[in-house]
Image (cartoon, helix red, strand yellow):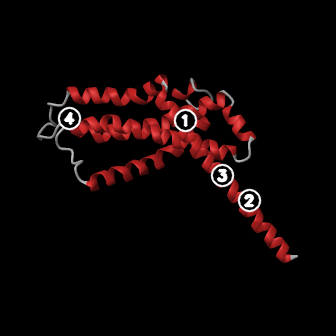
Amino acid sequence: MTTTSTTTKATTRAVAVNARTAAARAGLQRGWIEFRQTMTSGQDLWSVMFFPVVTLVVMFLLRHNTVPGTGFSLGSQALPGILGMNVVLNGMMMLALSLTMDREDGTLLRAKATPKGMTGYLVGKVTSRAGTAVIGLLVPLVPAAFLFGGLDLGRPSAWITLVWVVVLGLVAVLPFGAILGSLFGSAQGSASSPSR
């Protein structure tokens, strides 16, 4: 009886692991589909690109100004903060807003009704928002590399550092976005205060 009980427990664990793996795989696929839809929808593109484009225009207009007391370009000085703000806006706030909107339209309820549906849903949302955050980073970064002096982007170590800092930033802010999305009562109220 002990052997049968152990075998049953092992089988149950294997099925649970396979279900989680299948949900995570489905979530990755869902996230990729959502990301592609975002990149082909004018309204979604506008929401992703607005802040990066505005900051790029401001940096371009200030390109000949320097940080007081140095010869360092003001645009180069502002770029790291702008990139960080893009990660926070796209990673945390947009995830919170999309979770709140999906709760309002019943998408979360449908995800709860399927086995491991919430796992797949959350993996999909995180994947989609991480992709849009990366696009939001590239919009100011690529032109800034050509417009401003003082950026050391020619070395592979600079790009490796950028990648690990962005990944670390996304890992830090995406969970907060999910938490905030669960606290807001409605998408309209998400800008002001959490639900009570």
Q: CA distance from mark 2 to mark 3?
A: 10 Å
Return the mark for residue 64.
none
- Label tally: 4
Residue at the disc numbered 2? 15
Q: CA distance from mark 4 to mark 2?
A: 54 Å
Q: CA distance from mark 1 to mark 2?
A: 28 Å
Residue occupying the point 67% across, 36% down = 108
Left or right, residue 50 beside residue 25 = left
Choose the circle earlier in sequence order: 1 or 2: 2
Q: Amino acid at mark 2?
A: Val
Q: CA distance from mark 3 to mark 1?
A: 18 Å
Choose the circle earlier in sequence order: 2 or 3: 2
Q: Is residue 146 visible?
A: yes
Image location of residue 180, percent across then percent down: 56, 38
Residue at the disc numbered 4? 147
Q: Amino acid at mark 4?
A: Leu
Q: Amino acid at mark 1?
A: Glu
**Nearest-to-viewer mark from 4 and 1:** 1
Image location of residue 102, percent across then percent down: 62, 31
The N terminus, quarter of image:
bottom right
**Nearest-to-viewer mark from 3 and 4:** 3
At label 2, counting other C-alpha atoms closer than 10 Å, the crowd grade (few under 14, some 14-19, many 20 or more) is few
Image location of residue 53, percent across then percent down: 33, 28
Residue at the disc numbered 1? 34
Residue occupying the point 55% across, 29% down = 190
Q: CA distance from mark 3 to mark 4?
A: 45 Å
Q: Amino acid at mark 3?
A: Ala
Residue at the disc numbered 3? 22
Establish if 87 lies above or below 189. Answer: below
Q: Is residue 123 visible?
A: no
